[in-house]
Each structure stands twice: as structure tokens, then as C-alpha cells.
Image (cartoon, grey):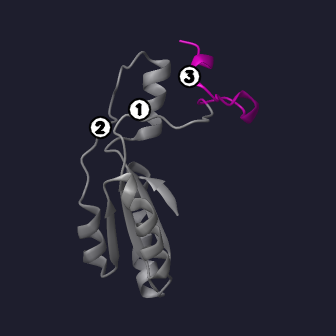
Amino acid sequence: TICGDGGFQMTFQEIATMVDEQIPVKMAIMNNGFLGMVRQWQELFYANNYVSVAMSQPDFLKLADAYGIKGIRVTDQSQVENAIREAAAYNGPVILDFQVQAEGNVWPMVPAGASLSETIEAPERVAH
């Protein structure tokens, strides 16, 4: 699975099932310390008026340890390939905590209430 740190905190209770059923799911967390999608909308459509997007969070490696599963933290791009290989080779659930740029945006994106045909591919197409 690939998820942001905010979304992961909304769903991580499924780790218990992975452990109980011995399901070797690899969980990649894109960890920027924000509710990233909401922060991006507020940046682009609400003139950087950020509300309730910065968030405290657990240490995801300690969370992995609490469940008795493997945790790997990636703090530099040079570590990505080895971390993915290590996780793939491990026969059990793994949390990969990728520390990413705090205010990096993700493209393409679909604005709230828009259809897929209204996907935004580049910042210059955003109407303020």
C-alpha cells in the first residue's frame, strides 16, 4: 500500500489483521507531517490559508515495533532503492516511513467536486 501519513493514521488499525493472519503487506508512508492533499488544496485554491492540516503523529517505527513488525525509515533519496528491496525480501508486514518534503505538491490532482476530465496537471492551470 502507498499512503500519506494522515491517511495512514486513519486506517492503520488494519495492521492487527495483517499480524494475526500473517499477511506480508508492505506499507509505504509518504510522511510530510501534513494532511497533504488538504494542504495542497488550501495552498492552491485558498491562498495558503492553512487550517487544520499540520499534524502531530506517532513515530511510525515505534508503531511497527509495537505490532511486532519490521519498520524501515527512509530520510534520503539515496536510501529508497535499498529500503524497497529490504521490504520486498522480508516475509512479513513492513512499514516503510519515507520522510518527504513537507510542502511538496502531488501532480496530477483532481480538485474537490471536479470530474476526472478536469484533472490539473501543472500549477499554471490552477485558477486562483
Write the residue at 57% across / 36% down: 107
In the rendered image, residue 8, in percent from the top left (x then y), is placed at 41, 57
Task: Name the disc covering residue 39, or none.
Answer: 1
The span picked out in magenta is 111-128
Tag nearer the camera, 3 or 2:
3
Could you classify mark 3 by the number of other residues whose Cα lies within 10 Å: few (under 14), some (14-19), or many (20 or more)? few
Q: Nearer the viewer, residue 78 or 107?
A: 78
Q: Quadrant of residue 47?
A: top left
Q: Which residue is mark 3?
A: 123
First in residue order: circle 1 vs circle 3: 1
Q: Nearer the viewer, residue 122 or 112?
A: 122
In the rendered image, residue 122, in percent from the top left (x then y), is placed at 60, 26
In the rendered image, residue 111, in percent from the top left (x then y), is placed at 60, 29
Amino acid under label 2? Ala
Q: Is residue 125 above or below residue 119?
A: above
Residue 12, can we see it? yes
The single residue placed furthest to the front in the displayed view is 78
Q: Quadrant of residue 83?
A: bottom left
Could you classify mark 1 by the number of other residues whose Cα lies within 10 Å: few (under 14), some (14-19), or many (20 or more)? many
Amino acid under label 1? Arg
Q: Is residue 117 left or right of residue 36?
A: right
- The local secondary structure at tag 3 comes to helix
Write the residue at 26% across / 52% down: 57
| Alpha-carbon span between mark 3 and mark 2 | 22 Å
Amino acid under label 3? Pro
Could you classify mark 2 by the number of other residues whose Cα lies within 10 Å: few (under 14), some (14-19), or many (20 or more)? some
Do labels 1 and 2 touch, CB within 8 Å? yes
Task: Name the disc covering residue 54, or none.
Answer: 2
The single residue placed furthest to the top in the displayed view is 128
